[in-house]
């Protein structure tokens, strides 16, 4: 059976041209017997979308018996949300071989969002010689799609609702407004 090879893509903007590359392990003899590839997107709301592809769209990689599959998203009309994706291979003998299904989250690549937080958690207090000390930590947050001009940030900790100080704001990547999911601000 064909199997998914790590890293398995998990998230991406529905504005992308293609799904991030899906790596699939498959014997070379099986790969040569593929007549077509069917990628099925099952949405949480029950909607299903199909993408039919030729076997020529599966590219070989430098790893033996591993292929990279780039799935075009054009004309699929995908909305934000979670989808279960299954890749099926219809063989020349009409046999169907499926990969294990995987979950993929599509998001709107034009809306502001938190792309990364480092570290993902920090201690807020510690006991030292029987005394509880409140700790101050520096956290780095990278955001996508924030306005690039006249940016004013006010931050609040979500769990404790205590105000925090924004030490610095810098634009790491700036792109034209026509590009989705590109601007990065730290």
Image: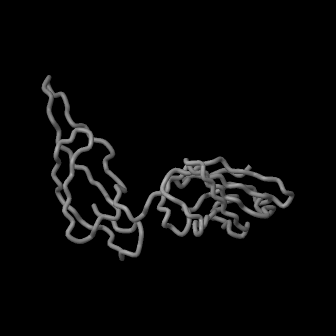
Residue 131 relative to residue 76: left or right: left
Q: Quadrant of residue 122?
A: top left
Which residue is drawn at the image coordinates 20% and 69% (left, top)? 150
Q: Quadrant of residue 154?
A: bottom left
Q: Nearer the viewer, residue 124 or 85?
A: 85
Which residue is drawn at the image coordinates 20% and 59% (left, top)? 153
Q: Position of residue 151 (x, y in %)?
A: 21, 66
Q: Point out the residue furthest to the top here.
A: 130
Numbered-mark total: 0
185 lies above or below 45: below
Q: Position of residue 71 (x, y in %)?
A: 61, 64
Image quadrant containing the C terminus: bottom left
Which residue is drawn at the image coordinates 26% and 43% (left, top)? 158
134 lies above or below 140: above
Q: Position of residue 118 (x, y in %)?
A: 31, 50
Residue 73 relative to residue 131: left or right: right
Q: Nearer the viewer, residue 151 or 34?
A: 151
Residue 55 relative to residue 5: left or right: right
The coloring applied to the image is: one colour
Q: Nearer the viewer, residue 157 or 74?
A: 74
Which residue is drawn at the image coordinates 30% and 67% (left, top)? 172
10 lies above or below 151: above
Q: Position of residue 80 (x, y in %)?
A: 48, 56
Q: Nearer the viewer, residue 49 or 170?
A: 49
């Amino acid at each position: 059976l064909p199997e998914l090879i790590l890293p398995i893509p998990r998230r991406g903007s529905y504005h992308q041209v293609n799904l991030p590359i899906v790596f699939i392990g498959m014997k070379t003899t099986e790969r040569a017997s593929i007549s077509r590839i069917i990628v099925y997107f099952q949405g949480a709301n029950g909607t299903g979308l199909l993408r039919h592809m030729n076997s020529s769209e599966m590219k070989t990689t430098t790893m033996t018996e591993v292929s990279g599959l780039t799935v075009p998203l054009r004309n699929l009309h995908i909305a934000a949300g979670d989808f279960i994706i299954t890749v099926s291979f219809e063989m020349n003998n009409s046999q169907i071989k499926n990969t294990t299904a995987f979950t993929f989250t599509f998001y709107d690549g034009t809306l502001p969002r938190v792309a990364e937080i480092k570290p993902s958690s920090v201690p807020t207090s510690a006991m030292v010689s029987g005394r509880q000390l409140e700790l101050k930590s520096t956290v780095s947050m990278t955001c996508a799609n924030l306005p690039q001009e006249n940016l004013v940030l006010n931050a609040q900790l979500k769990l404790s609702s205590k105000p925090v100080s924004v030490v610095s704001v810098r634009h790491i990547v700036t792109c034209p407004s026509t590009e989705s999911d590109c601007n990065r601000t730290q």
